[in-house]
Image: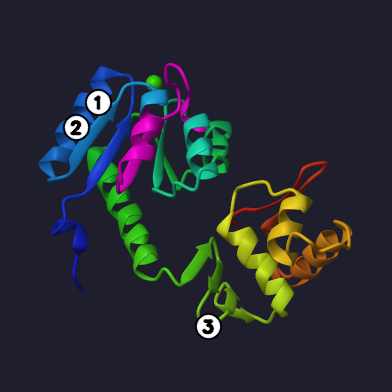
Amino acid sequence: MIIFFEVIRMNILLVEDESAVISVIQRGLTEHNLSVSVALDGTTGLQMAREHAFDVILLDIMLPGMNGIEVCKTLRRENVNTPVLMLTALGSTENVITGLDSGADDYMSKPFKLSELYARIRALARRRFTQLKDDSAISIGSLVLNTVSKTITRNNTPISLTATEYKLLEYLMKNANRVLSRMEILEHVWGINFNMGTNVVDVYVNYLRKKIDKDFENKMIHTLVGMGYVLKSD
Ligand code: CA
């Protein structure tokens, strides 16, 4: 097995305002031959994440300007899918859930061991690498859609969809974590001139739910009353 990250130098973005934390992380990761760029506030971090291709973003929650949750949400909304590891100061359950809901991939509570941080960065980068390598597959949580073979699996169990259901699911998955209005869905899945009203969206979302979510405890398709639908990782 080729361990790519020991060959290619990983670029890490650290968004953190505490100088003590910055110096510990920077020193530790540089020793492992990782390149660490630092942003001291949320707005700068967001800008850097948009402009450069980082392998992993380490994102503090409590930051001057824009907080880490908002930074992460904004990135995901803009389809910047760089893995995000949240650094939570409090480690409270609520903090963790909010962080993961915002689209973060993992979290660590401060203070943490550098060896563990390094291990988690490697895991995130490895996952990212696998995803990029197989870009014909879109995977959100346990749900995997292959755009070439047009096959869908959840927890490795094949799911059979009609052509329209497939188009709808592909659109939801490509925009995972983004709330899509019925109008947007209608335009993208059925075409802009489709004239049957948005009710057809509800009908097809229900069909999809029966196939994707019904037999699973954790639901992936969520309704936001008055706003539309969102597909999230389970
Ligand atoms: Ca902070």
Mark sitting on residue 22? 1
| Residue at 60%, 57% in the rendered image | 234
Ligand 1: image quarter: top left
Residue 61 covered by magenta stretch: yes
Cα separation, mark 3 vs mark 1, equals 45 Å
Residue 46 covered by magenta stretch: yes
| Figure check: 107 above or below 171 | above
Q: Which residues are magenta?
A: 45-69
| Residue at 47%, 32% in the rendered image | 71
Q: Are marks 2 and 3 in contact (CB under 8 Å)?
A: no
Judge the density around disc 2: few (<14), some (14-19), many (≥20) Cα neighbours within 10 Å.
some
Q: Are marks 1 and 2 in contact (CB under 8 Å)?
A: yes
Say which of marks 3 and 1 sits in front.
3
| Residue at 50%, 79% in the rendered image | 148
Mark sitting on residue 26? 2
Mark sitting on residue 73? none
